[in-house]
């Protein structure tokens, strides 16, 4: 941080054309960024709620996607439970089709730890079909022709990955098309906060596999690349959806008991 401060001061000193107002603005913005970093407000947009898509909402999201490659792209992101920055760096050479697995080198992960994550067999076969269609895999021998190519790339530019922002834009397009997006407030800079971001696919993976499907925490931890089991265990806290479902089930059961009691009372009275 001191080196950034020195560069900021050098820029101001070497820019005599800057007005006092502009110099003051630069300094204020710099100190604001420092305070944001020191205050550890990184997850401000999520608050205390894990913003994930329920299984029903996830189905609506996928059903809204009319581009086959976009749908495949987000299905892969969801099933791997990976971060968008990790996803865009996946190359064909990282996919092991015999094991339906994807290898994330240490330099491509946020934690700087290598890991292997697994895909459903059917989804791995869909990736094969996509590569064959693009001519990147032979149809009969299923031999890879260009292992260095990025698995998902814009147009025919196989050596150029999608940018993270482009993936976010595409996600927002479809989540809004599905009618799922909501604005739930504003951040400290006054910007609108969206209920769902592309990172919600990662949250959804953990919630669905840990809570709904009962996969052991240490297994999901390894799949998504959490360094600490404590991070994964956060998802065990009951979500608002689970609370609502539990109360609906309890009240339905209670209504049944009340109904049965009433029938018994009427029978005695007769």
Image (cartoon, rainbow, N blue to C red):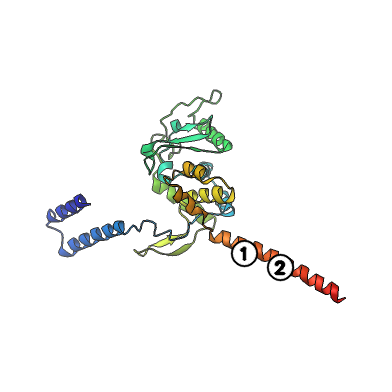
Instruction: Read off the residue under disc 1.
Output: 247
**Residue 154 percent coordinates (x, y):** 43, 40
**CA distance for labels 2 and 1:** 12 Å
Q: Quadrant of residue 253?
A: bottom right
Q: Residue at x 52, y 48 (%)?
A: 205
Instruction: Read off the residue under disc 2.
Output: 255
Secondary structure beneath label 1: helix
**Residue 46 percent coordinates (x, y):** 43, 58
31, above or below 126, in the image: below
Q: Residue furthest top?
A: 141
Disc 1 packing (10 Å; few <14; some 14–19; many ≥20): few
142 or 135, which is in the foreground?
A: 142
110 or 136, which is in the foreground?
A: 110
Q: Earlier in the sequence, mark 2 or mark 1?
A: 1
Disc 2 packing (10 Å; few <14; some 14–19; many ≥20): few
Say left or right for 265 vs 254: right
245, above or below 150, in the image: below
Quarter of the picture holding the C terminus: bottom right
- Tell me, for residue 222, which label it has, or none: none
Q: Quadrant of residue 109?
A: top left
79 or 221, which is in the foreground?
A: 221
Say left or right for 82 vs 266: left
**Residue 53 percent coordinates (x, y):** 53, 54
């Amino acid at each position: 941080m001191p080196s950034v401060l020195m560069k900021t001061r050098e820029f101001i000193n070497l820019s005599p054309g800057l007005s006092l107002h502009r110099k003051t603005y630069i300094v204020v913005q710099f100190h604001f960024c420092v305070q944001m970093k020191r205050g550890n407000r990184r997850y401000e947009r999520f608050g205390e709620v894990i913003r994930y898509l329920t299984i029903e909402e996830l189905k609506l999201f996928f059903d809204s996607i009319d581009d086959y490659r976009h749908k495949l792209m987000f299905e892969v992101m969801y099933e791997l439970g990976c971060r968008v920055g990790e996803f865009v760096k996946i190359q064909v050479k990282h996919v092991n089709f015999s094991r339906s697995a994807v290898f994330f080198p240490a330099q491509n992960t946020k934690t700087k730890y290598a890991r292997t994550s697994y895909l459903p067999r059917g989804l791995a076969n869909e990736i094969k079909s996509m590569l064959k269609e693009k001519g990147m895999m032979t149809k009969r021998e299923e031999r890879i022709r260009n292992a260095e190519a990025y698995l998902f790339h814009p147009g025919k530019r196989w050596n150029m990955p999608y940018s993270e922002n482009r993936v976010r834009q595409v996600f927002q397009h479809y989540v809004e098309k599905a009618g799922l997006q909501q604005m739930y407030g504003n951040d400290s800079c006054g910007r609108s906060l969206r209920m769902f971001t592309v990172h919600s696919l990662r949250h959804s993976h953990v919630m669905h596999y840990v809570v709904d499907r009962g996969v052991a925490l240490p297994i999901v931890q390894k799949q998504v690349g959490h360094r600490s089991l404590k991070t994964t265990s956060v998802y065990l806290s009951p979500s608002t959806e689970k609370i609502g479902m539990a109360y609906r089930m309890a009240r339905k059961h209670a209504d049944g008991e009340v109904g049965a009691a009433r029938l018994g009372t009427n029978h005695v009275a007769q």
